[in-house]
């Protein structure tokens, strides 16, 4: 029953694509269980670089079946443009399966995302503007449109009517925008039905049968732990559950089936969008991390906010996800610093605090307490085993492992597929 969950341990963008792809060859199914095209994976295969937003990264591994689970929100226009982009480069995408219960991001969800963010002004979340939050809001309000609705025109029309009823009032009377026509939305959505049909499946059944047959199933989280709607830095979060429990609800697999939960952890910290970030740097070190680490959003093209490693967050991720392992990424980015600060605790209103405070106010007041670790100057991109790393890099990894509460089982030392040190196999 090898069911692995792979998720971001910080605020997303930890380099999950590289990790999923590394495992891809031995994995039978790669499943996305939440989020939508707000995610951004960069996967490097040979000299080719792929940027994926919605599709599971397993789509690049020929033996693997990529699955979009019921917990994902799907924008069909993005889906087809990603698929055709891959097809043009010779990638076979025919094995893709999409849950009939997944919700559709409609054009009006995208509109609502944009107008509400604009309205919030200074209080904005800094969303990706892809309609993610409004689509999940419709799901919870029970006015969402699901993939299966595209196959019953009458039901689809009724549902779009119900969804637009209140929204059109809001758009015209409150936001001063034009009303959205039901017919136009229905026509656009129906236009995707035939193209989508070959991919639609009962993914819950498929995945549970696969697990019964001892197939290797990898659940790939989008975003990260601190962006989780329940466990993240609310309200500066995404609208789904990237944490491990989300894999169960978002794919229809029971918690007893999950054998391993791997947290992807960047050797420093980044965040996109608004919200608290205790170790954020506003100086030349932050600028250097951004430049060397290529910290620009795959989805939005926005510069990422950068800061030092935060062990309080890593410990929190271990706890809320029940992590069994970490995959430490981008260690090579830290090469060249004489000393590397690591946040080991916070100071909140004059008191030292070891664990992430549950209070949003306290977290906003948290100041990092740093320990200085000695840096290294040797190029580590060619390292194949842990012992190839300079002593100080080894000590940095060991210190992070001790502070974070789970073993570091792999280390990324460069962007390429083979630039990874495997310490313990994930399978
Ligand atoms: P939304 O997911 O578009 O609603 O955006 C909510 C918050 O999550 C914003 O701060 C986004 O910048 C952030 N976010 C969404 N997706 C990602 C991701 O894949 N990586 C990092 N941040 C993300």
Image (cartoon, rainbow, N blue to C red):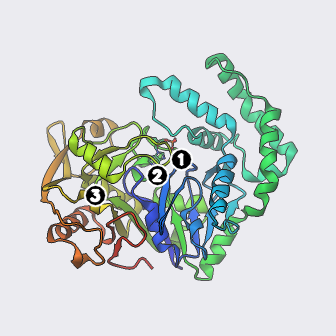
Q: Distance between the residues labelled 1 and 2?
A: 8 Å
Q: Residue at x 69, y 40 (%)?
A: 106
Which residue is identified by label 1? 38
Which residue is identified by label 2? 223
Q: Could you tell whether 184 is left or right of 299 in the image?
A: right
Q: Residue at x 55, y 37 (%)?
A: 129
Q: Nearer the viewer, residue 113 or 145?
A: 113
Residue 260 is situated, as x and y percent measured from the top left of the image, at 44, 72
Q: Which residue is drawn at 68% across and 37% down?
A: 107
Picture quadrant of residue 331: bottom left
Looking at this rendering, what residue extends furthest in the bottom direction?
213
Picture quadrant of residue 122: top left
Q: Report the mark closest to the observer, 1 or 3.
A: 3
Callout 1: CB less than 8 Å from ligand 1: yes
Q: Quadrant of the C terminus?
A: bottom left
Q: Nearer the viewer, residue 375 or 142?
A: 375
Q: Could you tell whether 134 is left or right of 331 in the image?
A: right
Q: Do the residues labelled 1 and 2 touch (CB within 8 Å)?
A: yes
Q: How far apart are marks 2 and 3 (CA)?
A: 21 Å
Which residue is identified by label 3? 333
Q: In this view, does 318 lie above or below 120?
A: below
Q: Report the mark closest to the observer, 2 or 3.
A: 3
Q: Which residue is drawn at 66% across and 16% down?
A: 173
Residue 138 is situated, as x and y percent measured from the top left of the image, at 65, 40
Q: Could you tell whether 149 is left or right of 49 in the image?
A: right
Mark 2 element type: loop
Mark 3 element type: helix
Callout 2: CB less than 8 Å from ligand 1: yes
- Binning the other alpha carbons within 10 Å of mark 3 as few (below 14), some (14 to 19) or many (20 upward) gives many
């Amino acid at each position: 029953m090898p069911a692995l969950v792979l998720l971001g341990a910080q605020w997303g963008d930890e380099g999950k694509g590289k990790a999923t792809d590394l495992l891809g060859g031995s994995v039978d199914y790669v499943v996305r269980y939440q989020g939508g095209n707000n995610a951004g994976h960069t996967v490097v295969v040979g000299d080719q670089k792929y940027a994926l937003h919605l599709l599971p990264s397993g789509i690049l591994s020929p033996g693997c079946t990529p699955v979009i689970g019921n917990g994902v929100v799907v924008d069909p226009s993005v889906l087809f443009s990603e698929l055709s982009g891959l097809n043009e480069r010779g990638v076979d995408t025919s094995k893709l399966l999409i849950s009939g219960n997944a919700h559709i991001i409609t054009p009006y969800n995208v509109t609502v995302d944009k107008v509400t963010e604009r309205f919030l002004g200074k209080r904005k979340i800094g969303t990706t503007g892809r309609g993610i939050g409004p689509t999940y809001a419709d799901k919870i309000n029970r006015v969402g449109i699901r993939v299966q609705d595209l196959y019953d025109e009458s039901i689809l029309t009724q549902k779009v009517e119900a969804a637009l009823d209140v929204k059109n009032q809001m758009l015209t009377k409150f936001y001063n925008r034009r009303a959205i026509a039901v017919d136009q939305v229905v026509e656009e959505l129906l236009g995707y039905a035939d193209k989508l049909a070959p991919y639609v499946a009962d993914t819950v059944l498929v995945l549970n049968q696969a697990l019964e047959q001892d197939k290797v199933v990898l659940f790939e989280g989008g975003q990260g732990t601190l962006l989780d709607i329940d466990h993240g830095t609310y309200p500066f979060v995404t609208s789904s559950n990237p944490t491990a429990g989300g894999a169960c609800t978002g794919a229809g697999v029971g918690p007893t089936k999950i054998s391993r939960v791997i947290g992807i952890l960047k050797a420093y910290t980044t965040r996109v969008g608004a919200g608290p970030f205790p170790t954020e740097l506003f100086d030349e070190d932050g600028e250097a991390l951004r430049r060397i680490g290529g910290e620009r959003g795959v989805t939005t093209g926005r510069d990422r906010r950068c800061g030092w490693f935060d062990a309080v967050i890593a410990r929190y991720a271990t706890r809320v996800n029940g992590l069994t392992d970490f995959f430490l990424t981008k260690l090579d980015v830290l090469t060249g610093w004489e000393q590397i600060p690591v946040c080991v605790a916070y100071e909140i209103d004059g008191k030292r605090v070891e664990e992430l405070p549950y209070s949003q106010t306290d977290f906003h007041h948290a100041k990092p307490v740093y320990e200085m670790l000695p840096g290294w100057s040797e190029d580590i991109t060619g390292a194949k085993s842990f012992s190839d790393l300079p002593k100080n890099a080894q000590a940095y990894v060991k210190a992070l492992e001790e502070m974070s509460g789970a073993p570091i089982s792999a280390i990324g030392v460069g962007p390429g597929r083979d630039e990874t040190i495997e310490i313990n196999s994930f399978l």
